[in-house]
Image: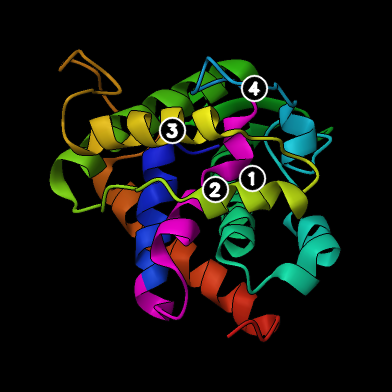
Amino acid sequence: MPSWAIHLQAANLLYKRTKNMDKNKFIFGNILPDINNGYVIKEISKTVSHIITHFSVDKDFGNYETFYNKYKENIKNPLVIGYLTHLLTDFYFNDLTYSKKGLYNGEGKFIGIKLNSGKDKICTKEEARILKTNDFKIYANYIYENNKIDELKYDNEILLVNDIIEEISIKENDILNTIKYINLHIQGKEKIIKEDTKEYKIFTQNELKEQLDLCVNFIVKYLDSKKWW
């Protein structure tokens, strides 16, 4: 899955295409599926597995269509549409990584990844995931340092999402800790990667910029197909 910074940037770009909903709730909805996993926010009130929150039997590919079909009656809710767009963003970037850049043998087994140097790296899927995650972390710093992402604000109505989406369970302190984490990075008080020597391995900065725009187009096309607008 991409970093929270990529989700936040995608959400901000998507909001510019819509502007007909509560921005703060929509942006927050875009990181909702990850909060209960305990990967980013360590002190969480309840841990829920990634498989459940992402409607998935695979840690990389969630099922956004399953989510839509289950919650389409609530899809006008900015938190719900944010949740859906998170799943769509995850799918886009994981498909880009594993389907388009992945190397497979004649039996369809993953055997490596294409690097931005033009070379092929023979490795396990877990090793490729680590390279992908590192690239996303480097790009996260770029987003926080060079793009204007609005800080999030606490809204007690966010808690109402518990009454809609049964795959998550968040409390007030979970929301506050999440907002604090995000805002500290937006303010430049925290960094995803401290070292300046980290290098992109699979992607490049320009490629990720382009792919973020293409991801937003992919999401808009999907929402158009559902006549969400």
Q: Is residue 72 above or below residue 97?
A: below
What's under tag 1, amino acid-wise? Ser
Sequence-first tag of 3 and 1: 1
Count of numbered circles in the view: 4
Q: Badge 3 is on which residue? A: 176
Q: Secondary structure at mark 2?
A: helix
Residue density around tag 2, few if under 14, some if 14–19, many if 20 or more, within 10 Å: some
Q: State which quarter of the image contains the C terminus.
A: bottom right
In space, the residues marked 3 and 4 are separated at their CA atoms by 34 Å
Q: Position of residue 122 (x, y in %)?
A: 57, 18
Sequence-first tag of 3 and 4: 4
Numbered badge on residue 177: none
Q: Position of residue 14 (x, y in %)?
A: 42, 68
Q: State which quarter of the image contains the N terminus.
A: top right
Q: Nearer the viewer, mark 3 or mark 4?
A: 3
Please provide the residue range marked out in magenta. Answer: 16-37
